[in-house]
């Protein structure tokens, strides 16, 4: 079997008929032998956007026709690359800092002293409430409700009483119950 890069040369314009009878025409951006995928840049009609990216599994292709071969420069060894968008170093650094902060927060949510069931309850509460902390083996939610081991609905209680806190207690009990 021929490599995908031979059948679908990068920067060539191809017309692909899928097994669903859909015809897709675009420029080959890349191929991936491992996933058997062809990545196409397809021009959009009736929009100000220039193109969309389609990833097509080669098993879904019934026929392929090369409409235009890629333009080759002076030498045959030229590497054909579709232009990539500009990437801001500042935005990459911000994304990295955010990822590190989120990872550190996730580590702060782990309590080695808690049972696996307690950790699972804590994780569910964090997803629903965000303001959840460990106090020893006790879980404290919104500084209003505590959940004691073994972390059942009967182990939930208010830290301070009040009408607003009653609603929080009921919500926590529902989350703990699953």
Image (cartoon, rainbow, N blue to C red):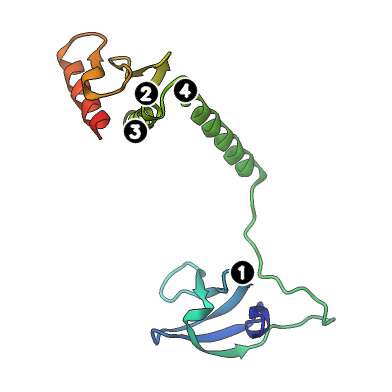
Residue shown at 38% from the left, 84% from the top: 20
Could you tell which of marks 2 and 4 lies nearer the N-terminus? 4
Query: Counting other residues with Cα less than 10 Å from the Cα at mark 1, is it few (<14), some (14-19), or many (20 or more)?
Result: few
Q: Is residue 69 left or right of residue 73?
A: left
For residue 111, which numbered disc appears in the image? 4
The answer to whether the residues at label 2 and label 4 have Cβ atoms under 8 Å apart is no
The N terminus, quarter of image: bottom right
Name the residue that disc number 3 marks: 124
Could you tell which of marks 3 and 1 lies nearer the N-terminus? 1
Where disc 4 sits, the SS reads: loop
Where disc 1 sits, the SS reads: loop
Query: Counting other residues with Cα less than 10 Å from the Cα at mark 3, is it few (<14), some (14-19), or many (20 or more)?
Result: some
Residue 24 position within the rendered picture, expressed as x and y whole percent measured from the top left: 47, 82
The answer to whether the residues at label 1 and label 4 have Cβ atoms under 8 Å apart is no
The answer to whether the residues at label 2 and label 1 have Cβ atoms under 8 Å apart is no
Inter-mark Cα distance, 2 to 4: 16 Å
The answer to whether the residues at label 3 and label 1 have Cβ atoms under 8 Å apart is no
Q: Is residue 10 above or below residue 91?
A: below
Q: Is residue 127 above or below residue 154?
A: below
- Residue reaching furthest to the top: 160
Where disc 3 sits, the SS reads: helix
Q: Is residue 72 above or below residue 100?
A: below
Q: Nearer the viewer, mark 3 or mark 2?
A: 3
Residue shown at 59% from the left, 38% from the top: 94
Name the residue that disc number 1 marks: 34
């Amino acid at each position: 079997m021929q490599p995908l890069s031979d059948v679908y040369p990068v920067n060539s314009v191809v017309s692909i008929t899928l097994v669903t009878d859909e015809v897709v025409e675009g420029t080959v951006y890349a191929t991936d032998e491992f996933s058997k995928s062809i990545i196409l840049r397809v021009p959009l009609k009736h929009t100000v956007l220039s193109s969309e990216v389609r990833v097509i599994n080669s098993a879904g292709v019934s026929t392929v026709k090369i409409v235009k071969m890629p333009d080759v420069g002076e030498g045959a060894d030229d590497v054909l690359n579709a232009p990539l968008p500009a990437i801001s170093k500042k935005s990459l650094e911000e994304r990295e800092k955010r990822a590190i902060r989120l990872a550190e927060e996730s580590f702060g949510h782990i309590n080695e002293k808690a049972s696996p069931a307690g950790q699972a309850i804590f994780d569910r509460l964090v997803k629903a409430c965000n303001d959840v902390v460990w106090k020893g083996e006790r879980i404290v939610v919104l500084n209003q409700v505590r959940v004691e081991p073994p972390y059942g609905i009967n182990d939930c209680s208010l830290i301070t009483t009040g009408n607003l806190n009653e609603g929080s207690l009921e919500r926590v009990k529902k989350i703990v119950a699953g």
